[in-house]
Amino acid sequence: MAVTFSDLHTEAGLKSLEAFLSGKTYISGDQITKDDVKVYAAVLDKPSADLYPSASQWYECVASKLASSFPGKASGVGISAQAPSTEAAPVKESAADDDDDDLDLFGDETEEEKKAAEERDQAKASTKKKESGKSSVLMDVKPWDDETDMKKLEEAVRSVEMPGLLWGASKLVPVGYGIKKLTIMLTIVDDLVSVDSLIEERLTVEPINEYVQSCDIVAFNKI
C-alpha cells in the first residue's frame, strides 16, 4: 500500500515520520529499499534523537547503508532550505514544491510510463537500423587451375546466402596460361556482413573450395 509523507523539512512532517517508524527499522519491510532512499533524500538533516528517536535511528541506519555503497571520499556538501524567489515563475515553483513535499512511495511504473519507454526504445532501434551503412565490394575469385569449371565456380559463390548480402554483376577475366578469374560485385550491410568472415568461413571452405583457391578484395566503397 502506498504511503505519502508531506513537508519532511518541517516539524509536523518529522512527527508524522516518527510516528510511522515507531517500532520499525525501515519504511517497507525489514530491509532497506528505494522507499527508504526516497524519504532519506527528502529529509534535510538528521532528526533530533531526543525529539524523534525512531526517525533519528532510521536516518543513521540508511546513511550507513548508503555510505557503504559509495566508498569514495566525500568532501561534504550542505543543503539549505531557502524561501522561493518572488521573481520565479509561480507555476514552476508550485510544481517543484509538489515534488519535494508530497512524496509518493508507490514507485512502480504505470502502464503509460512502461508503454512510453517501450516506444522510445523501439524508436531508437528503428533509427539505429536506418543509420546502418552499406558498402559496395569488388572481389576477385581465383580458381585452382585452367581445368576448373568456372560456371560451377560462380554458381558455388552465388549459392552463399546470408542476411545483408546481395550478389551483383560478374565477369570472367583472363589472368594468363589459360586461367581466368571471376570478378564479382557484391553489396553488404556493414552491421550484418563481414567480408573477411565471408571469405574465410564461406567461400574458401568445403564444398566451395573444390573450385575456389582464393579470394581478393579489389575495391571496398561505402555507399
Image (cartoon, rainbow, N blue to C red):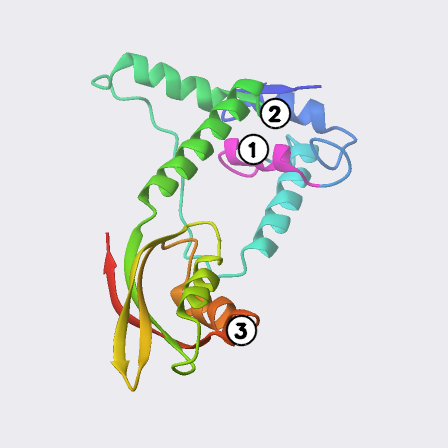
- Residue 188 visible in the shown view: no
Quadrant of the rendered image containing residue 71:
bottom right
Q: Mark 2 points at which residue?
A: 105
Q: Name the residue under label 3.
A: 205
Q: Which of marks 1 and 3 is nearer the N terminus?
A: 1
Q: Mark 1 points at which residue?
A: 38
CB atoms of marks 1 and 3 within 8 Å = no
Name the residue located 48 percent from the left edge and 58 percent from the top edge.
160
Mark carried by residue 124? none
Q: Is 152 a magenta residue?
A: no
Disc 2 residue type (three-letter): Leu
Quadrant of the rendered image containing residue 169:
bottom left
Q: What element carries label 1?
A: helix
Name the residue located 62 percent from the left edge and 23 percent from the top edge.
106
Q: Give above or below for 29 relative to 194.
A: above
Viewer-nearest residue: 21 or 136: 136
The x, y position of residue 147, in whole percent, is 43, 80
Q: Give above or below for 156 relative to 133.
A: below
Q: Earlier in the sequence, mark 2 or mark 3?
A: 2
Q: Is 45 a magenta residue?
A: yes
Q: Give the range drawn in magenta.
A: 32-46
Disc 1 residue type (three-letter): Lys
Q: Give above or below for 20 relative to 198.
A: above
Name the residue located 31 percent from the left edge and 21 percent from the top edge.
84
CB atoms of marks 1 and 2 within 8 Å = yes
Q: How far apart are marks 1 and 2 (CA)?
A: 8 Å
Q: Is mark 3 on a helix, strand or loop?
A: loop
Q: Give above or below for 91 relative to 197.
A: above
